[in-house]
Amino acid sequence: MPDRIALRNRISELEISKMFTEKILDSSNDVIAYFEPLYNDDVIEDFVIKYVNNRIVDIASLDTNEMIGKRWLEYDAQNLENGAFEKVKDCFSTGESFNYAVKYVFGDQLVWFSSRVVKLEVGVVMFLKDISKEKDYEKQLLIQNKLLLEAEHVASTGSFRWDLNNGTLNLSENVFRLLGYEPFEMNATLEGILKFVHKNDINWVKGVIEESRKTKERIDITFKIITKKQELKYVNTIGEYYPSEDNWYVVGVFKDVTQQIEHESLLQSKNAELKKSNADLEAFNRIASHDLQEPLRKIQMFISRLHDEEHGTLGPRSQNYLNKVISSTERMRNLISNLLSYSRIEEVKDKPSKIDLNEIFTNVLEDLSGRIDETDASIISDKLPEVNGVLFQMEQLFSNLIGNALKYIEANRTPVIKVKCSSVVVNSFNQIPKLKSGTYHRLDFIDNGIGFENEYGDKIFEIFQRLHGKTEYSGTGLGLAICKKIVEAHNGTISAKGKIDEGAVFTVYLPSLS
Amino acid sequence: MNKMKILLVDDDQDDREFFADALVGINLNTQLEQLENGKSCLEYLIRQIENLPNLIFLDLNMPVMNGFECLTEIRKHPKLKELPIAIYSTSSSDQDIEQTFLKGANIYIKKPSSFNDLKKSLSQVIKMNWAFHMDDFKKENFLLRI
């Protein structure tokens, strides 16, 4: 009896131990399987799955009961393709253990395992650790690295990391290309890199590096290099110091700015040329118009004396000729004096003063009173602001704009001119061409004159642009050019809109005092 | 009554002729002396130090010595510095006008472009009571523009 009890106890102990072992195996994070070989003429042709723990259910949604007892390759042919069968066979034949990475597809899911196979008595134990996530990260890292390299290539930049502790310099592929080498073709050292710096820049570059080593301040310099292929390039280098555990390291970029520098210098020389030719033109204009005044005045003087002395004795044709000469010289005098005032706008270095535009408006109406009375014109204005400016220039601006409105009108129409005023804020949401951010006064000079086609809106402000024959409407072609120059000298802009036979609006923006 | 002595300094012969004719035309009791540049003007004034003109018309743009230099020299000289001086020039630039004012000119006449206007300006300037006005010019420190 005691034997039977002992035997029962022993059996139940064994059952408990088996359950215990299985529980332990199932609680493992790895898939654990045990295989025994199947022979065909002394050659292993497959393995029988003797055991697999429940972890395979979580990872691959496979049924362990279905797997156990099956032939391994028959159950899943992937084991042949991914090399797992070979490894297990080798392990069994040689008794060696192997570690390897292996790939499975379960349904639409790709799973990477780190696998270890160990021979155990008449079979092989396999441990599979799911490393799909790690594989994913690795792949992403590779993609990002590739992206970075491509970006550097596209942007003509390269990057570096320089460790001050041991002097090692890590360079990205593109740094080598910048210097005319294939990636990693030469040894990367600071001294090696400095050899490419142009001899005119080398001392300065070394100085900057030495200084920054002391101060740990950001490096941002542009210098010339001579590449392996003897090309001259301009390189901009930015480096930033970061503390490491016991020293500092510098991370930064090299950028090939050769094209930029070349474009810039081209632009600068073009600009200088333009400035010079502009200055020449202005000087010519000033001198020409000033020197032209002298003989012209004399011509007018002689004509006036001729007129005084011969008046009444000349025949009607000769008198007509003389009158034509008088009006032509008067026109020429106007032209020259306008040219002079145009060329002098920039000359004026007067300090701008606070100007009440209402006063300017009143003064200008007084100056134009003859023409206003003649035409019975009505001219009204909103209350106008004070601005910073040069007094006589502001007077000229108002005089030209209102004078034009009186001049360019059909003979039988009564001029109606309005000056409207409003305040405008210019910022990134409300941009007006050529104006910086800030508050501006907007002045609209609205008339009911002959107007113009809007396509001429810009042209009318150019010097010597006339839209009408001078016999129709007198004008020198300078009035609006002078207006434009005055407004721009006051940091404002002027523009115009028109409609044939209905009128025109000239819009002036001037900076507000506040 | 003594004739008013007027000195015109201008290198342009036509302008001198216009000036002389206009002076005759306005028929005021004047006597005109004409010179061609600042240097001959200064030499003349030194020679005539006991018999100075009553009024000088001075062109600006002249060879040898221009109007600005001549004006400066006259205002430096103890016996000449109170002579009434009218600038008579083609220039209407504010810069020139300001310069002559700073150097001590009393009147600025822009050369007119008609003979009638010239006669008007000259008669206006000559009819001024100069003995009286020079005190004003000194006291008030201003430039009369015509």
Image: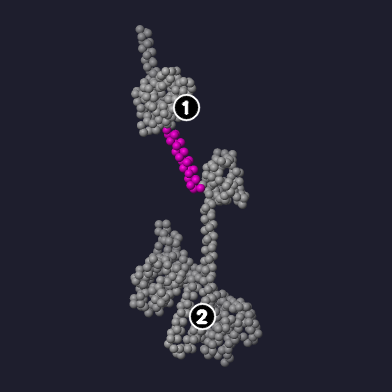
Tag 1: residue type?
Answer: Asn
Q: CA distance from mark 2 to mark 1?
A: 108 Å
Magenta-drawn segment: A132-156
Q: Is residue A482 visible?
A: yes
The residue beneath circle 2 is A297
How far across and how far down the image is residue A371, in percent? 39, 78
Residue located at (39% from left, 66% from top): A455
Q: Is residue B128 above or below residue A55?
A: below
Mark before the other along the chain sequence, 2 or 1: 1
The residue beneath circle 1 is A99
Residue A335 is inside the magenta segment: no
How far across and how far down the image is residue B37, in percent? 61, 80
How far across and how far down the image is residue A218, in percent? 55, 48
Residue located at (34% from left, 77% from top): A412
- Which image quarter: residue A419? bottom left
Q: Chain of mark 1?
A: A
